Image: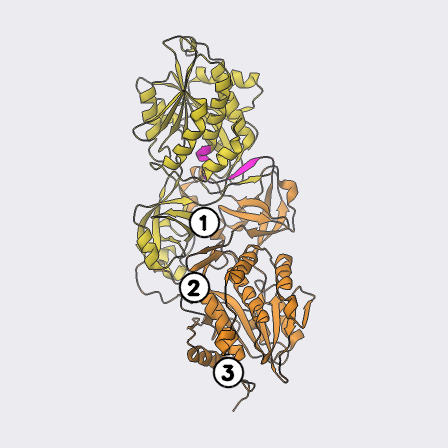
Chain colours: A yellow, B orange
Amino acid sequence: MIDIKEFLNDLLSLPGLSAYEEPARKKISETWEPFVDEMHVSPIGSLHALSRGVGGEPRPKILLACHMDAIGMMVTGIEDGFLRFTEVGGIDHRLLPGMRVNVHGKRDLPGVIVMPRAELLPEDNSTGPVEMKYLFIDTGLLPEETTSLVKIGDLVSFAQEPSELPNEVIMGHTLDNRVSVAAVTICLEELKRVSHDWDVWAVATVQEEETLGGGLTSPFAIRPDLAIAIDVTFAKGPGASDYRTFPLGKGVTLGIGSNIHPGFRKAVKEVADKLEIPTHDEFLPLYSGTDALAMQIVGEGIATLVLGIPLRYMHTPVEMVAMKDIQRAGRLMAAFIAGLPHDFMQRLHWDD
Amino acid sequence: MTTKNMAPLIEKEQIDLLERLSNACGILSDVGEIRKIVLESIKPYCDDVHVDALGNVLAIRKAQQPDALRVMVAAHMDEVGFMVIEKEEGGLFRMLAVGGIDSRYLPGKPVLAGKDHIPGVIGAKPIHLMKKDEMKNTMELEDLRLDVGPDGGDKVKPGDPVYFATKFQQVGPSLMGKALDDRLGVASLISLIQHTPANIELLAAFTVQEEIGLRGARVAAYAFNPDLAIVMDSTPSYDLPTWDGSENIYYNTKLDAGPAIYVADTGTLSDPRLLQHLFKVASENNIPYQIRQPGKGGTDAGSIHRQRAGIPSVSISVPGRYAHSPVMISRFNDWKNTLTLVHTALAEMPKNILQRN
C-alpha cells in the first residue's frame, strides 16, 4: 500500500504554480502509474489517467478532477536587489510580511517578504496593512547577485515546510488542493483492487486558481458522463464559523447548488451513509469555487458533483487538514464507483 | 603578536553556535535553553560563573595583570514572543505579546508553544470569506489565535511561552533567522570570554528581560559594579528603497556598513570617552563602522549607565533587518567586524580611559 502521508508530504514540498504545474505533475504521474492503465498530458498540462472499467462498450466514464496548481507570487520588479511582486491566485496581502518564500530564479533562492517602515511608504499607507505593491522580497543576497539571478516574471512559492499536528492533522501550504490529489490517489489504489464497470479518468487539473483552464478543457477531451470536483472547503476556525464552514476532521462535504446534479449527489450520499462516512451539506447556491463550475458547462453539459475536504486557513501557508477526511473522500469515491451500475445514466433523472 | 591576530575569528564553530542560539527559544526570564548553551560554552574559560535571582548569567574572567579595568560587557538572552493566556475550544488559545511585536507580522505564521516546542500556527480567516473592507484593517493579536490543531489542546496551557518557528539559515553573505536580536550579541560575548584580552577584567552579563524593560541588566550592573560597560546588541536596519525612489534618510543603520555605534537613543547618551576610543580604534585598525542614526530605540545601556553612582556606557550593535519579526537578516561581515571592533577596543583600552582632563 502506498504511504499516502509520505506522498502528500513530498507533493506539498514541490512547486507548481498555476500554469507551471510540472514538478507536481511529475510526482503525481509517478505515483499514479502503478494504479492506472494509461496516462497522458493535455495540451495545457493537466494529467489524465485512466483506470479502465470492465463493463461492456460503450462504457460509461466518470471523471475525478483534483486541481494540482498552487497559489503563489510572481516577480514584477527589482529595486536595489529587493524584489517587487504580485499574486498568482488570491492572497491576502496582510499575511505576507515575515513570510518565508522560495524565489524560482536561475536557481531557487530562499527569501522573506518584508515591509518597509512607515517613513519609507506613501502617507496614505503609512499605517495599517501595507499594500502588496509596497512589499518586497529580500533574498539575503547582495543586490548585484539578486539582479543576476532573478528576472521579472520569475515565480515565487511559499516555503513553509509541511508538518504534522496531533491526531494526523497536516499543516502546510498548498494543501489546497494537493490533499484532493491524495484523496484521488487513495481512490485509484482502491479501484486497482476492486472491479468496476465504469472507466475512471483521474485528472489532476491545471490553473484552477486563476482561469479554471483545466476544468474547462479536460472534460472536453474525455467527455465523461459524470464528473466530480474534489476540492477543499472551509473548516470552522478563528474568524470562520458561518454556514459556509464545517468541522475539521469530522467528515467530508457534498455540495448542494447550481453546479451539482441532485440525482448524482443523492446516489453518492447513499453510499456514504451505507459506509458510515460522515458528510455535511455544503450550500453553494450560485456557484462553487471549484472545477465543477467549469466542468458542468463543457460540451453538451455534464452532471457534476462537488466533494469537499474541510481545511482551516485557506490560501495561507499554514493550512490545516485532517488525514481522516482525506481518507474518507478517497474511500467514498472508490466505493461509489465500484458500485456504479452500467446503466446509471439511464436511471439518473430529475426528481420531477 | 598584534592585537588583530588575537581577535576571535568567526568560523564554522561560531556560526554553528549562532545557529543553535537562534533556534533556541526564550522570553522574559524563561531563557533556560539559551542559558544552557551559554553555560556550557563559557564555563571552562571563567574564573566565576553564577546565575542570579532574575536568571542572568554573570561570568567573570580575570585579567592577567594587576589593577586592570573592570569592564562589563552585556548581551541579552531573551527574545520577543508571546504568552498563552486563555484556552478555548478545539486547540485554540489566546496570546499576549511579550516585547514589541508589530501585529502585521503575525497572521499565517508558524509558531512553537511551550517547553516541548509544540508546533502550531497563527491562522487567518480565508480571503474567500473576507469582506473587502476587512482587508484594510490590521489583524490584531486579540483577534488572532494560536492553533495547535483540533486535537492538540491538551499539549499547551495558559502561561506557556510561544515563539516564532523559524529555522536559522546562512544564505550567501547573510544570516537569516529569528532572535538574531540578540543572539548575535550572545554569540559574540561567548567568543569574547573565550578570547579575553589580557589587560582587562571581563564582567560578562548574559541578561534577561531586556525586551520588556532592561531589568536583567540593571541588577547585573549593580552586582558587577564595573568601571565601564559595553552593550552588544542588534539594531534595526531600515535600509530599503523608498516607495517613490527618493533618498532613504530614515535607514537607522545599513547592512554591510559595519558595526553600529550608538551615540544617542531613547535611553542612553553614550559616554563620549568611550565613543572617542571606539572611533580611534576602528580607524587605526581599518575596522569599518557606522554611527547608528540618533533616535528611538534602546539597549541594556539604558539601565546600566544609571546604576549605582553611574557607569560610563556605550552600545555597539550588529545591524539587522526586520527585528522583532519571524525572520531577521544580518550580514556575516557586520558580525565579524563588530566582534573585532569590541575585542580590539578592549585590548587597546588605556587604563586611564575614564580620566578627565
Q: Is residue A257 above or below residue B328?
A: above
Mark 1 falls within which chain?
Answer: A
Q: Chain of mark 2?
A: B
Start and end of the magenta stretch? A167-178
**Cα gap from disc 3 to disc 2, whole angstroms:** 26 Å
Where residue B273 appears, x then y in whole percent? 50, 83
Q: Is A232 contained in the magenta span? A: no
The answer to which of B125 and A346 lies nearer the viewer is: A346
Which image quadrant is residue A87 in? top left
Q: Which element is circle 1 on?
A: loop
Q: Which mark is residue B273?
A: 3
User: Spatial distance from mark 1 to mark 3, Cα to Cα?
Assistant: 43 Å
Task: Work out whether A234 lies above or below B113.
Answer: above
Circle 2 residue: B237
Q: Amino acid at mark 2?
A: Ser
Residue corresponding to mark 1 = A99
Q: Amino acid at mark 1?
A: Met
Whether residue A173 appears in magenta in the rendering, the answer is yes
